[in-house]
Image (cartoon, rainbow, N blue to C red):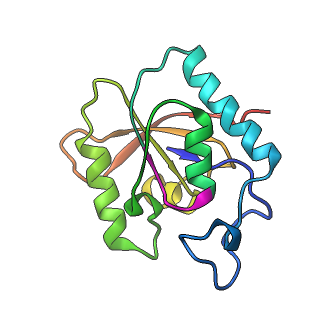
Amino acid sequence: MVRHGSAPPGYGDPPGFKIDDCATQRNMDERGRAQAKALGEAFRRRGVPVDKILSSPWCRCLETARLMDLGPVESVMAVASSERSPERLVVLKQMVAAWRGPGTLVVVTHAFTVRALVGIMPEQAEIVVVRPRPGDQTEMDVVGRISTPR
């Protein structure tokens, strides 16, 4: 689970934003773009095999995923889940629980999505490494965290 790069001021979007219009959303700044590139470099440096990249359709997440440059990015509304969208959250949990690789599933999302999944509110551009709990289609265990690139 990757929270998107720096997008001041920190949470939410302006009133009246449109999902299909980046000009109406809270977007990444230059620091966020640099963080996204550094995240991708960290995956490559560590030799992490990436098989699939899912992103929230919000522009800051899509841009983060694309700048990581790890492969094709699939925009999926379930990846934008939170406590306020329980149906999407169930779908996202099932997607993560069903992943069998062989490589890594990378999910680029929002802080509130990560909090809804595992109870952690990550910093911008922080990675929270999760694994499905054996025998459970909805719960995940946190197995690591990788700090925001500086």
Residue 85 lies left or right of residue 22; in this view the side is: left
Tell me what residue is drawn at x 46 percent, y 76 percent: 84
The answer to whether 70 is drawn above or below residue 114 in the figure is above
Residue 104 image position (x, y, % from top left): 39, 29
Tell me what residue is drawn at x 66 percent, y 71 percent: 12
64 or 119, which lies in front?
Answer: 64
Can residue 57 be found in the magenta stretch?
yes
Tell me what residue is drawn at x 67 percent, y 69 percent: 25
Tell me what residue is drawn at x 50 percent, y 14 percent: 47
The answer to whether 71 is drawn above or below residue 33 in the figure is above
Residue 144 image position (x, y, % from top left): 52, 32
Residue 121 in view of the camera: no
The answer to whether 65 is drawn above or below residue 43 in the figure is below
Q: Give the residues drawn in magenta, as a range.
A: 54-59
Residue 109 image position (x, y, % from top left): 53, 53
Residue 103 image position (x, y, % from top left): 34, 25
Can residue 97 be found in the magenta stretch?
no
| Quadrant (top left, top right, bottom left, bottom right) of the C terminus | top right
Count up the numbered dots.
0
19 or 103, which lies in front?
Answer: 19
Residue 16 in view of the camera: yes
Residue 104 lies left or right of residue 44; in this view the side is: left
Q: Quadrant of residue 38?
A: top right
Residue 1 lies left or right of residue 150; in this view the side is: left
72 or 31, which lies in front?
Answer: 72
Q: Quadrant of residue 100?
A: top left
